[in-house]
Image: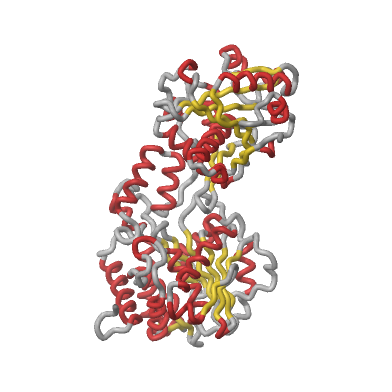
Amino acid sequence: MAKKGLTKGEEYRLKALSYIDRVMSGERPAGKYERLAVERHQNDLKMAMEKGIYFDDAAARRYLSFCQLIKHFEGEWAGQEFIPEDWQCFILYSIFGWKTKDGVRRFRYAAVEVPRKNGKTTLAAIIALIGMIADEESGAQVYSAAVDKDQAGICWNAAGQMISRSKKLSQVCKVWKTSITYEETASFYKPLSKETKNKDGLNPHFAICDEMHAWPTDDIYNLITSGMGARKQPLIFIITTAGFNKESPYFKMRKVYIDILEGVKTDENTFAIIYCPDEGDDWHDRATWYKASPNLGVSVKESFMEIEYQNAINKGGTHEVSFKTKNLNMWVDAPDVWISDDLVVRCDHGTTDDMLDGQKCWGAIDLASHMDINALALYFPELEHPAMKFFFWIPEAKVKEKEDRVDYRTWVNEGWVKITPGNVIDINYFVRDVSEILLRYNMQSLAFDPAKAYHGVIQGLMAEGFDDILDEFNQSMRNMSEPTKELESLVASGKLDLMQNPVIRWMFRNVAIYRDANENIKIDKKRSSEKVDGCVAAAMAIGTNMSYEDNDISNVGVAYVSMK
């Protein structure tokens, strides 16, 4: 309900003004770039005539009032009216209130950088719907652009959910499989990514650029901007969290936004606000968290932040990177080491080979080239301390090489690595060895990537009678992410027993983690020559076990293989 005597637009205007006062007075612990965005608004009010701009308060109120048509569609507030927070009101108030002397909207570009769970998707979806419905643009084309179709669909789907829960919006809009339409002005809203077909001829009115920190190129962005020339007052709205790739197109744009906020550069067409700690702030300090997260205590629960923080402290690696980038909006370099060596060494609980006998075992094999390391990982999750036993094979010629900068000969002598005769992996020898190992243990499954089963190993194992346990496991980002996170958690927490294997310890030091926009991760190499085969096999073994635990084999891309 609006305050007595006030329309929703007037009420939300007052919230925007209150936010300005709280930031300027210091009541809100704002970061530097948040404060500069507010100061810019205040200074522009004083310099408006000189700049050839003015603030249309009535227009700002009209667009703010659009929020009353929106209902929450998930979480604890599902079904309730969406009431924008004061910082959200300020963003809408600024973007839609400022105009040029010609009466058209001033801002054609807007960028909001804010941590996850602060309602950025909701805000972006509302702006998209405003562009399609409330902007009175004939034939408005509105797009949600992202690095892939799944990410592009998140904001678009949120808008569809908003329409379905609004009596008024559902009467005038139609939600289709791949578009939302507003027939009164022949306007539509669609997701857009590099996977979208027929991208030529775009004439966007509004475009949402979602999680732009993860965009590897600016091709889609340039396509959008080049198509906006025919529109009277178009808007590109960038909504993103921080990332770790400081060579990304967005990070370069971010530098420009900071220059605008600091007054180093002038750009009257761009609005920008960045919620993040200041340089020198201690990320361990809870007071710093409020600078980064304007919805802390509202949609971002303090308890959630504490759990995420403890994971970052206890597990380090990707957990620390994720907390800093996604929860505190800090741009950081990805760590050189995925999991620190001291944590890997700690994964020793005295498990012996005899203790593995009879225990249910999920295995995975990572097949390299004929001339490289092949790895077998066996996972025993039902022990008091889950154990991972590894086996490695290399061709005889590889032992003599120095390019990997490790002493293979010592590992061979100590039994950690097996040699196959000749210059390349001897398939018959390898299959015989693996078969003997599989017969010893209570094997439930043996995962393999069909894309790497090219040199007859899997065919050989089938011929040996193991077709009933062979499971295809595609090493895609989607399939590998959750198992890799589980491996990280098991090692970082010290729960896993790596059975003092020096080879896997070395391989952990070689791992670099690749991350995508959806926080999926995958094991990669720091350099092309590095060896990480054992870590990959370990993640696959955990993944096939997870699929059996969930009783949903498709969950991690495992498929049963049979000769029948």
* Vertical order, 354 against 207 (above or below): above
Q: Position of residue 200 (x, y in %)?
A: 70, 70
* Vertical order, 400 against 44 (above or below): above
Q: How is the image coloured?
A: secondary structure
Q: Position of residue 157 (x, y in %)?
A: 51, 65
Is residue 266 visible in the rendered structure shown here? no
Query: Which residue, as the protein is rendered here, is positioned at the far top?
Result: 413
Query: Which residue, as the protein is rendered here, is positioned at the far front?
Result: 564
Along the horizontal axis of the image, is 140 left or right of 273?
A: right
Q: Position of residue 532 (x, y in %)?
A: 58, 32
Q: Quadrant of residue 68?
A: bottom left
* Vertical order, 562 against 164 (above or below): above
Q: Which quarter of the rendering shows the N terminus? A: bottom left
Q: Quadrant of residue 491?
A: top left
* Residue at 69% from the left image edge and 30% from the top image edge: 458
* Residue at 69% from the left image edge and 18% from the top image edge: 420
Is residue 509 visible in the rendered structure shown here? yes
* Residue at 52% from the left image edge and 27% from the top image edge: 361
Q: How many marks?
A: 0
Between 555 and 313, the residue placed more toward the observer is: 555
Between 514 and 73, the residue placed more toward the observer is: 73
Between 391 and 356, the residue placed more toward the observer is: 356
* Vertical order, 437 against 524 (above or below): above
* Residue at 48% from the left image edge and 83% from the top image edge: 100
Along the horizontal axis of the image, is 535 left or right of 454?
A: left
Along the horizontal axis of the image, is 171 left or right of 218?
A: left
Q: Which quarter of the rendering shows the C terminus? A: top right
Query: Which residue, as the protein is rendered here, is positioned at the far bottom?
Result: 102
Q: Position of residue 413 (x, y in %)?
A: 59, 12
Between 125 and 386, the residue placed more toward the observer is: 386
